[in-house]
Amino acid sequence: MKKIKVLLSCLTVVVMTTSIFIGCGSSTSTSASKAKADSGGKTTVTVWHYFDGQQQQKAMENLADKFNKSQDKIEVQVDFVPRAELTKQFTIGLVADKLPDLGLVDNPDMASFAAMGLFADITDKMNSYEGKDQFYPGPISSCKLDGKYYGIPLGSNDLALYYNKDMLSAAGVEPPTTFDELKTVAKKVTKGDTYGLAISAPKNEEGTFQYLPWLLSTGAKFNEVGSSAGVSSLQYLTDLIKDGSMSKEVINWTQNDLEKQFVTNKAAMITDGPWIIDTVKKDAPNLNWGVVKIPKDKVFASDLGGENWGIIKGHHETEAWEFIKFTQQKDIMNQYCADFGYIPSRKDIAESNEKITKDPIMSVFLDELQFAMPRGPHAKWPEISDAMSTALQESFTNAKTPEQAAKDAQVKIDAVLK
Amino acid sequence: MLKSNHSREFIKEERIGYLFIFPALIFMLAFVGYPIIYNFILSFRDVNVTTFSNPIKPFVGLKNYIEVFKDPTMGISIWNTLVFTIGSIAIQFVIGLGLALLFNLKFKLSEPIRGLMVVSYLIPMTVTALLFKFMYSTSGGIINELLMKFNLISQPIGWIIDSKYSMLSVILTNSWVGIPFNMLLLTTGLSNISPTLYEAAKVDGANVFHRFFKITLPCLRPAILSVLVLGFIYTFKVFDLVFVMTNGGPVNTTELMSTFAYKLSFTQFSFSKGAAVANVLFAILFVVSLGYLGLIKEDEVMD
């Protein structure tokens, strides 16, 4: 009995002391980080991004440099955080309050983070901002949730069809514009270890991103995977694998892998975004290639990629907004978008940039942008996306028939949207 | 023996003993106890994207557990975790025991080679995962290249991208990591067996098999038990290896409970469901540990 008593009293003491420790731990760390931010008379605004490309990282640094030199009140500091880590840090940071002042997130994630209370509501700032109506409808709608603004687009991109000119002309075919044409062309140019078409279909957001154009093109909406049109899109892609025109390894390829397949002549056509243009030119300077819109079933479709700025709630909101406004100037936006391989999300800037409108490649991506749908926006988009990329994998690996896979995905999506 | 001794002296000593373990206890409660309790509470609340910022998170009872078990991925992930664990342990144990016996022969160079064997256990999991990912690759991966060179296969096998082989591939990788661990613990066990036992058996005319099954295995029982249980606990919660190599794919063929819980929490932001899966994993391991403690007690009584 005595033993138990001693043990119990020990435990109580321990629990009390630990709760004190925990209390101390979090409060000291926050005050420390705030003190650091305000040192030296300048306000430091920390920015987190997940761009791992060298060129993109440099573009981010340049952007901050230019801003820091343009005034002497705010110092922007750019930090790279790997993507998986960034998502985790944002959610953990919400509890532990270890967050930057400004974050860049993939546009379909914006709604989730906004719903979780990560981002400040900038509706008032936006309403008094003169550039507000210049954004393309897709990009700006991805910044909104329940009618309120939580972010502003960094830049946009979309998917289009890259094709190998030499291979297509050797087979005596033109670049395809419809699903049927694509099927025939893909079959004709499949030879040896060259596949006609390659898409990227991993079981994550990237897979969903790549699948959506095919789904939307059949006339189905993002929440209608299980409809007959939705099933037909999955059937169409699965048939391409069955025909031998597309490798079944696509379930493991990222969009960067597609670029490698394309430049090594292992894929005659790929669906990819404008961010790979420079890499293709560098990897294969002699490759003869072009870009067309993704072939259509009923309507042209693509989906919207790109990141949004989001100001972290309760941090240096005013200063972060100053920086965002700085990035919205014509020359500056054109410069960093060119470095990123992105299209400016603003009509006034993109459509007056001759490097985009007169360029045979970039103009296709600009044209495609009007058909580019934002993913969601929905706070539970990640769950919807998971259902779609799972269906894609199930169908491609023959784990389920396209119809069954699509129907099962529909059940999951309905459960999320109800 | 000491249990009957209730002298003042002893109680005083015992109190001092508590004082010594006090810091460790604080540490355990803060860094082990707190997260477990927090996770437990989290799993009974409804915390997801929409309720995350609410000041009050409602208790929803077993709703998260019911929803998680309704999800077919849960059943698949439990099954996969069991296959992964038992498969890994079987391979690790058999090879580990074989190597332990081999190096116990104390031939020339046996010590340095045994030292080298441990390298695979020392490499960080993520690095191992990346290495094997390259080795399993269908274009230029060394495993496929070798098999093709020796004409064992004509087409490269999609070790980690083909649903037929993906589980086997991650099990083999995990076994490679676990073999030295098994070998070391079993070697320690072997060195505790008195050589006089073998000498006596030899005199009595027992052959190699008799000696192995009648002396080595029974004497190794405690070591074998710890190896298996520790191996089970260690393997059951493996996360990094699978996360890096396959991320649970293709489809769900290598989805473990650990990767599933991570996915629910950090890609779908269903924190409560993620916590529920983690707790199921915890409960299974807890039961296994209790069983282990029971077995140890039994052994001690026997001794």
Image: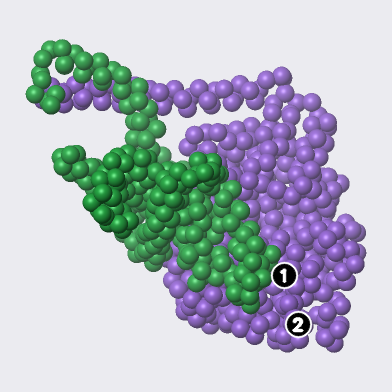
Chain colours: A purple, B green
Based on the displayed image, in which of its 4 quarters is residue A14 positioned?
top left
* Residue at 75% from the left image edge and 82% from the top image edge: A191
On the image, numbered disc 1 is attached to which residue? A271
Secondary structure under badge 1? strand
In screen coordinates, is A145 left or right of A159? left
Q: Can residue A124 be seen in this view?
A: no
Disc 1 chain ID: A
- From the viewer's perspective, is the residue at label 1 or at label 2 nearer? 2
Name the amino acid type tagged 1: Thr
Name the amino acid type tagged 2: Lys
Q: What is the tally of numbered marks visible in this picture? A: 2
Mark 1 and mark 2: Cα distance apart in space: 19 Å
* Residue at 20% from the left image edge and 43% from the top image edge: B299
Image quadrant holding the C terminus of chain B, namely: top left
Disc 2 chain ID: A
**In terms of depth relative to the viewer, which is nearer, A253 or B134?**
B134
On the image, numbered disc 2 is attached to which residue? A191
**Of callouts 1 and 2, which one flags the residue occurring earlier in the amino acid sequence?**
2
Is residue B75 placed above or below A87 in the rendered structure?
Answer: below
* Residue at 34% from the left image edge and 35% from the top image edge: B33
**In terms of depth relative to the viewer, which is nearer, A167 or A209?**
A167
In screen coordinates, is B100 left or right of A262? left
**In terms of depth relative to the viewer, which is nearer, A407 or B286?**
B286
Q: Name the spot of residue A135 as percent of width and height, x first.
A: 73, 55
Q: Can residue A18 be seen in this view?
A: yes
Q: Name the spot of residue A308 as percent of width and height, x first.
A: 67, 50
